[in-house]
Amino acid sequence: MALRDDFVIETIARLQRRISERFPASGLCRLCGELLDVARHASQRSAAIGRPIVWIRISGYALAFASVVLIFWYGASWVAGHSIESEVSKLTDLVTLIEASANVFLLVAASIYFLLSLETRIKRRRALSAIHELRSICHIIDMHQLTKDPERMLTKWQGTANSPRQQMTAFELNRYLDYCSEMLSLTGKIAALYVRNFDETESVAAVSDVEALSTGLSRKIWQKIMILEQVAARGAILIEAKETTPERPQ
């Protein structure tokens, strides 16, 4: 089981068509189009992050191989040029040589580790940069639904001169909020693409943060939808009660 980028892109494209059919000139439609472009780039970027960086790996392996060959060659040369008697007589020189060799070995090992970890650090930087972009998109989606209050559907609601204009019906507002919730969920799925082939700890934690952010914002939207449905249900009950009330005789 694996998250497929082509299915994510297809789902976002279908969502954009749905939004354009109901709200063709809205900012939410344009934002969903930008989210679709981000998803397409995410497919390419996640594949690039998952691929190995060849020149770094070749450099690290070449340095490790050259270090091993150099150590064996130097050791063999030293043994060939010293007899057992001379080693005993020059024990102090031997200890000094071992200490110097250990320092050189630690330096070479640190260089090899730096090269081998450089690939992970480069991939991590790329992944975190892309994930930060998705975090910003979540906040932009939340800004689009921020002024869409279901309380405005109440008959007793009174606005002010600076109140945002409400030109949607209850049904349209319900669909608008639902589209925002779907976009937040799909943003979390795009973030998961970046760690599909790169399960580095810090990157996975960043993806979890984006998913938690999108879930929290979506929860606020669903609270609005529930209020809207309660308002609609209350209105339907009032209409039904009015229709079933018998008329008084004149």
Image (cartoon, rainbow, N blue to C red):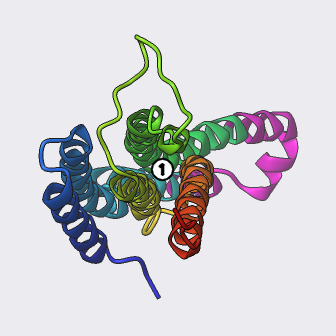
Up/down of 146 relative to 109, above or below: above
Residue 235, quarter of the rendered image: bottom right
| Residue positioned most to the top | 161
> Residue at the spot x=55%, y=40% of the render?
151
Q: Amino acid at mark 1?
A: Thr
* Side of 182 where 228 appears, left or right: right
> Residue at the spot x=44%, y=53% of the render?
184
User: Could you say which is closer to the camera, residue 236 or residue 193?
Assistant: 236
Disc 1, SS? helix
Q: Is residue 112 magenta?
A: no
> Residue at the spot x=43%, y=63% of the render?
189
Q: Is residue 81 magenta?
A: yes
Does residue 203 appear anywhere in the picture? no
- Percent position of residue 21, x then y: 14, 61
* Side of 97 where 235 appears, left or right: left
| Residue positioned most to the bottom | 1
Up/down of 214 relative to 186, above or below: above
- Percent position of residue 178, x then y: 42, 59
Residue interval drawn in magenta: 71-100
Q: Is disc 1 surrounded by few (<14), some (14 to 19) or many (20+) residues within 10 Å?
A: some
Does residue 28 appear anywhere in the picture? yes
- Percent position of residue 14, x then y: 21, 69
* Side of 200 where 85 appears, left or right: right
- Looking at the rendered structure, the number of numbered marks drawn on it comes to 1
- Percent position of residue 202, x then y: 60, 48
User: Could you say which is closer to the camera, residue 210 or residue 202?
Assistant: 210
Q: Would you name the residue on which mark 1 appears?
A: 120
User: Could you say which is closer to the camera, residue 235 or residue 70?
Assistant: 235
